[in-house]
Amino acid sequence: MTDPVPTSAPSSDPDSRPTSGAVVLARWVDDMVHREVSEPFSLAEARLYVIPTGQSQPAFLLDSDEHPYLLLERTNDHVEFSAAALVVSGWCAPTDPSDSTRWRPSEHPLRQRVRVTVAIDDRGIATVMRRDGAPNDPEVMDDRGEGELPDALERWWRGELV
C-alpha cells in the first residue's frame, strides 16, 4: 500500500502542491526507468510496474510487451495491486481543435519522441512525460492527461478491460 501523503493549502508553486500516491509512483517509476535506459525514448516494450496490495515496498516490474494494450489485457487481475504504472515510448504531437486534419502523432510534422509514465491508484491517476530535446526535464501532471493510454489504464484499473 502506498504511504499517505499529507495535504495542505494549495500553492501557486507546482512543486509544493500536495501529491497523490499516483503522482509519487509516476515520478518514482519514471526516475527509475530514466536511470536504467541508455536511450530514453526507445523502449522496446511497454512496461507495467505494480505495488502489491498491503505492501509498502517499491514498485516492481510485473510484465512487458511490445503492445501496451495487450499487456494490460494479459495482466487484467489488478485487484492484487494497490497501485500500478504503465511506461511506454512513442510520439506526441500538438493538437489543434480548429484543424480538421487528423494527423497520427507519428506522422505529424511537429512530432516529438516521448516517454510517458501513467500511474494509477484508488485516489487518482497521474502522468509523467519526457520529451526528446529535454530528456532531463520531466513534465509531471497530476491528472490523467489525454488519449487512449490513460483511458485504457483506467478501464484496466476498474476491471473493465477485456
Image (cartoon, rainbow, N blue to C red):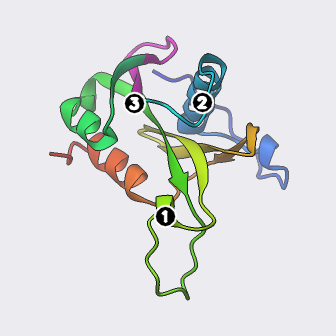
From the image, tell me which residue sits under label 1.
Answer: 107
The answer for how far apart the CA atoms under marks 1 and 3 are is 21 Å
Q: Which segment did they paint magenta?
A: 46-60
Please report whichever mark, 2 or 1, sits nearer to the chain's N-terminal start. 2
Single out the mark in the foreground, 2 or 1.
1
From the image, tell me which residue sits under label 2.
Answer: 30
Is 65 drawn above or below residue 149 in the view shown? above
Please report whichever mark, 2 or 3, sits nearer to the chain's N-terminal start. 2
The answer for how far apart the CA atoms under marks 2 and 3 are is 15 Å
Say if the magenta span includes residue 59. yes
Name the one closer to the observer, 159 or 34.
34
Name the one closer to the observer, 93 or 56.
93
Q: Which mark is residue 45?
A: 3
Is 8 drawn above or below residue 147 in the view shown? above
**Cβ–Cβ below 8 Å for labels 2 and 1?**
no
| Crowd around label 1: few <14 · some 14–19 · many ≥20 (10 Å) | few
Look at 58% across and 79% down and name the residue there.
96
